[in-house]
Each structure stands twice: as structure tokens, then as C-alpha cells.
Image: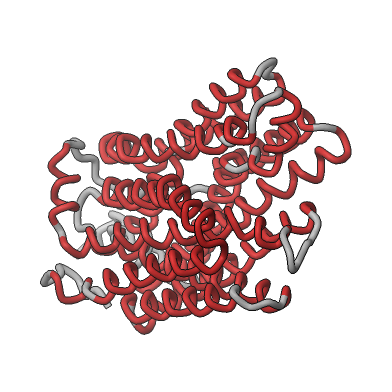
Amino acid sequence: MLRSLAPAPLPPAERYRRGSRELRRVNLALFVAGLTTFMSLYCTQALLPVLSHAFGVSPTASSLLVSAATGTLALAVIPVSSLSERFGRTRVMLVSSAVAAPLGLLLPLCPSFPALVAVRTLQGIALAGVPAVAMAYLADEVHPEALGGAMGRYIAGNTVGGLAGRLLPGFVTDLAGWRWALGVTALVTMLLSLAFWALLPRSRFFTPSRAHGGSLLRHLADPGMRRLYLVAIALMSMFVTVYNYLGYRLIAAPFGVPQSVATLVFVMYLAGTFSSPAAGSLADRVGRRPVLLGACAVAAAGLLLTLAGSLVAVAAGLMVMTTGFFAAHTVASGWVGRRAATGRAQASGLYLFSYYLGSSVGGSAGGLAYQHGHWPATVAYGLILISVALLAAAGIRSVVASRVREA
């Protein structure tokens, strides 16, 4: 009897597992994506005083160069995530980065302040594709046992990008002016975008579906999802409030540090670079709920420490708070992707909308606390928000009989 010469069928594709070469490539690609996205998103923040002087606008007007980008990104993440359900994760991310990178090159060429705001508005819309889809892509392609760690590494890229986007333009401005600062930043993000395009593996487990409002409504109807979105709003409101107004405290008595030194508080973002992957990996091993609750408690302890009268203690408190915040953000965002059986990009889009809603609305509301009660009132406001996040996280496990084990 003749043996068949037909080749044996290939084994079915398997999601990327911890320790595999393919997962390392995915982690690197998404780290680079987070780096370039958040460098672009926050590249004007450190330059606001310089740009205010250059164009003769008030500090409030100058802040539009940040809020125009973050606000339009928040509005765009949900429709962009819906597009990815129809046209694919990798396609949307690659198109997003391909459009956003050239827009950055237009910033140093802008002749007026309204032109700068207009380009930043377009840049926010273009940048939305990566954060709106990255978490869903990871949830599709990465094995559940390694999803938390992969999500943590992506968020670590976000933290490094946010830090670099604030520090690099500031350093270049001192040497060559703000136009060169934005130009150099745009060139760096262009090179990073090229690396992202080369590294990102194509989707293997994505199944196209017709995006519609029903998926959004299903996610909003899930009490566990609603609690995760509330965690995002509360924690981001606290986090942005602290970084917005701590500088005012450091410049005033009794510390009286120079403005240039006060801006170095953003270096504390590096704490999130380490805590994000660590928290994600820990959540993979012991469960998401206990790690999320623990991260919130760490953030609260750090916030309390900033009440101290010692500059060293304040710096230590800020580092601890930042560590807890990014750990909690990693676990909560990963939990959204794991919990959503369908419409994962839309579930992640709702999470990011909540996240940036907290940044814009909750962060501004924190200014009222600082205005009326200075730093003690600001800390009290932040602790209330952390308490809201703790209560929301504590109830997630019991609200639904989940399709998958949640913790």
C-alpha cells in the first residue's frame, strides 16, 4: 500500500505564549507604538510657557495645544475602535501612525497660534488609532496567561513616551528654539513609526464584524465593565490633578524650588515604566482583582506621603503614587480586553474614552480643590477618587457570572 505523499496538515495557530520569540516581537512593536504615540501627544506640554510668549497668548489659551490633542483623541477612540472591528486591528494602527507622523512635521512650520491648534486637533484624531486598538489586538493575539504582562509592557511604552514627549522638546528648546524642538520630536516619532510598521505582526485571530451601536450598549450593560470604566475615570482624575498642581506647591514656600526643577516631577513617570509590566505579570499569576485593589492602596499611600513637609518625602510619595496608578491602569485595561467576548476594540475604546474624560474633566475639577484648600484639599480630593476606584474594583467579581474566570 502506497504511503500518501501529501504534506501533513499544519497545526492550528496558537496565541502567543509567555517566553516565545513571537511574543517578544509583539511586545517590542507595541512598546514602540506607545512610545511614538505619547511622545506626539504630549510634545507641546513642556513648551507651553515658551509658546505663550512667542504668540502672545495667555497660559489658558496656550493649554489648548495639549487639550486639543487629548480631547479629540478621546472623542475619536470609540469610532476608530468600531472601524477596527470591520477593517482589522493592524490596518487601523498602521494607517493611524502613517497619518499622525507627517502631521507632526507640520508643527514647526505653523505661522500662527490658530494654525498650531488646528494641526494639534488633527494630530489627536490621527493618533487615536493606536491606543483605541492596541489593547484589543493584544487580547486577540496573546494567550490569556501572558496577556497581563503584554499589556503592562505596552503601557510602559506609554509612560516612556509621555516622559520623552515632555523632556526632549524642553531640552532642544533651550539650545535651538521651539520650532527645532517640535521638528526634532517629529523626526524621532517618524523613525519610531517606521520601526513599528516593520515589527508589528499581522493579526491571526481577528474576525471582521459589522460595527454597530449594539456592541457598545452590551459593554455598557455589563456592570463589571461599567465598574472598570469608573476605575479609569476616577484614577486618571486623581493622577492628572496631582501632576497639574504639585508644581505650584513646590514653587511656593516652604520649598521654593525653581520652575526648571519643578518640571522634573515628570521623571517620576519612570516608576510606571517598571510597575506596569510587573503588575500585569502578577495579575496573570494571582488574579486581576487583588492586584488592582493593591495598586489602588499603593497609590493612596503615596498620595498621603506628599503631605509631608520634606521635599524628599514628597518626591518619594509622588513616586509611590505613580507606581500604584500605572499598575492599576495596566490591570484595569487588561481586564477590559479579557472580559469582552466580542467587540474588544469597542470595549477598549470605551475604557480609553473614560480615561481621557477623567484627564480633562476630573483634572480640571482638581484645580478647584487646590484653589480653595491648597495641597491638603487636593490630597483629600485625590483620596476620594481613589476610594471610588477601590469600591468599583471590589465589586467587579460578584456583579456577573463571567464567561471567563475574572480573577
Q: Looking at the figure, which quarter contains the N terminus?
A: bottom left
Q: Position of residue 123 (x, y in %)?
A: 53, 30
From this viewpoint, is residue 15 visible?
Answer: no
The residue at the point 51 percent across, 37 percent down is 67
Q: In the image, is residue 184 above or below residue 343? A: above
The colour scheme used here is: secondary structure
The residue positioned farthest toward the top in the image shown: 111
The residue positioned farthest toward the bottom in the image shown: 286
168 sits left or right of 358 in the view: right
Q: In the image, is residue 349 above or below residue 385? A: above
The residue at the point 25 percent across, 59 percent down is 4
Q: In the image, is residue 150 above or below residue 57? A: below
Q: Which of the 4 quarters of the picture holds residue 147?
A: bottom left
The residue at the point 40 percent across, 64 percent down is 16
* Of 270 and 52, the residue lying toward us: 52
The residue at the point 49 percent across, 65 percent down is 377
Q: Looking at the figure, which quarter contains the C terminus?
A: bottom left
From this viewpoint, is residue 305 visible?
Answer: yes
The residue positioned farthest toward the right in the image shown: 175
* Of 225 and 203, the residue lying toward us: 225
* Of 322 and 96, the residue lying toward us: 322
Please count the marks in the image: 0
145 sits left or right of 34 in the view: left
222 sits left or right of 316 in the view: left
Q: Position of residue 334 (x, y in %)?
A: 36, 63
Q: Position of residue 398 (x, y in %)?
A: 16, 76
Q: Position of residue 378 (x, y in %)?
A: 50, 63
